[in-house]
């Protein structure tokens, strides 16, 4: 029998935030790039993205993937040396809260109000987004724990990353529900004894509903009033 989770442990990028894949048209508009020039769609359509497929085959790391994409976009803008922090500073820092998925913001708030401890386990949170971005996020008021590979240098799916998160959350692994958009990170969490929910970017609404159901949360209008 599956135990009802007492804690919710979330990846940040693509789970709490809209992914860059979903926001290509906005990125093009903000950066002044030709419409539909960003045509790589990662998990939304792997056939369009050889670099994504290389990452899934472990021929490059996730950090390698985003480093190359950021540099590629920077060069399209006529600049060199862009990393993910430079890219995200251009496209997301003016309105940090707009980068957060509305349904996930509601879910995190409902979980916190229900006494469910909410944490973030990320490989590149501050490395990619920067401290000032995070300080302006309303959702962080409901986040009790942040374990960030930017500082620890221990990255998912290393077992030590999950151990650090379990220790920080102060809950048994079997009472934690871990959510991530990368299968390798889900597999690592399962090996560490956590409950898991894969976050499929092709069905965000369905994934959000599944998380809420597993936490016995009512996200209907007025439920938290």
Image (spheres, rainbow, N blue to C red):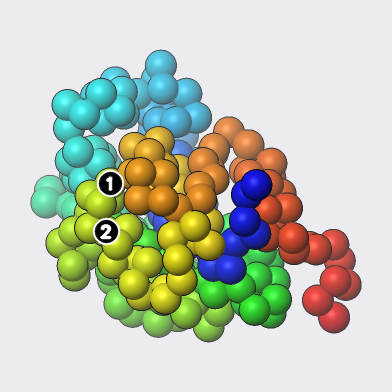
How many dots with numbers?
2
Could you tell me how far apart the alpha carbons at marks 1 and 2 are, in whole angstroms?
Answer: 7 Å
- Determine whether label 1 and label 2 are within 8 Å by CB: yes
Q: Is residue 153 visible?
A: yes
In the drawing, does residue 68 fall left or right of residue 22? left
Q: Is residue 62 above or below residue 88?
A: above
Q: Residues within 10 Å of mark 2 (few under 14, many from 20)?
A: many
Residue 134, quarter of the rendered image:
bottom left
Q: Is residue 32 visible?
A: no
Residue 59, quarter of the rendered image:
top left
Query: Nearest the camera: 95 or 48?
Result: 48
Query: Nearest the camera: 170 or 90?
Result: 170
Q: Residue furthest top?
A: 47
| Residue 190 screen position, x and y as percent | 41, 44
For image coordinates 22% across by 58% down, the residue present is 160
Kindly identify which residue carries mark 2.
Answer: 161
Kindly identify which residue carries mark 1.
Answer: 157
In the drawing, does residue 131 fall left or right of residue 179? left
For image coordinates 47% across by 23% down, the residue present is 45
Q: Which mark is residue 217?
A: none
| Residue 110 screen position, x and y as percent | 70, 71
| Residue 10 screen position, x and y as percent | 47, 59
> Which element carries disc 2, helix, strand or loop?
helix
For image coordinates 65% across by 47% down, the residue present is 1
> Which element carries disc 1, helix, strand or loop?
loop
Q: Is residue 72 above or below residue 4?
A: above
For image coordinates 42% across by 73% down, the residue present is 169
Residue 75, quarter of the rendered image:
top left
């Amino acid at each position: 029998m599956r135990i009802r989770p007492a804690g919710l442990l979330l990846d940040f990028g693509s789970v709490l935030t809209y992914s860059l894949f979903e926001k290509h048209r906005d990125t093009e508009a903000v950066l002044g790039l030709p419409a539909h020039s960003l045509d790589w769609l990662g998990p939304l359509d792997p056939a369009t993205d050889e670099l994504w497929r290389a990452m899934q085959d472990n021929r490059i790391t996730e950090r390698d993937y985003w480093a190359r994409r950021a540099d590629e976009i920077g060069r399209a803008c006529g600049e060199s040396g862009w990393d993910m922090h430079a890219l995200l500073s251009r496209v997301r820092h003016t309105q940090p809260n707009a980068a957060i998925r509305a349904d996930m913001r509601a879910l995190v708030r409902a979980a916190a109000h229900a006494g469910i401890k909410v944490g973030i386990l990320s490989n590149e949170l501050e490395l990619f987004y920067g401290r000032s971005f995070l300080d302006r996020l309303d959702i962080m008021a409901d986040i009790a724990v942040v374990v960030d590979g930017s500082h620890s240098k221990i990255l998912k799916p290393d077992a030590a990353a999950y151990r650090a998160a379990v220790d920080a959350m102060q809950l048994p692994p079997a009472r934690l529900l871990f959510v991530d958009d990368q299968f390798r990170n889900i597999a690592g969490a399962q090996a560490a004894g956590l409950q898991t929910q894969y976050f499929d970017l092709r069905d965000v609404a369905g994934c959000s509903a599944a998380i809420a159901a597993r936490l016995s949360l009512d996200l209907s209008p007025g439920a938290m009033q």
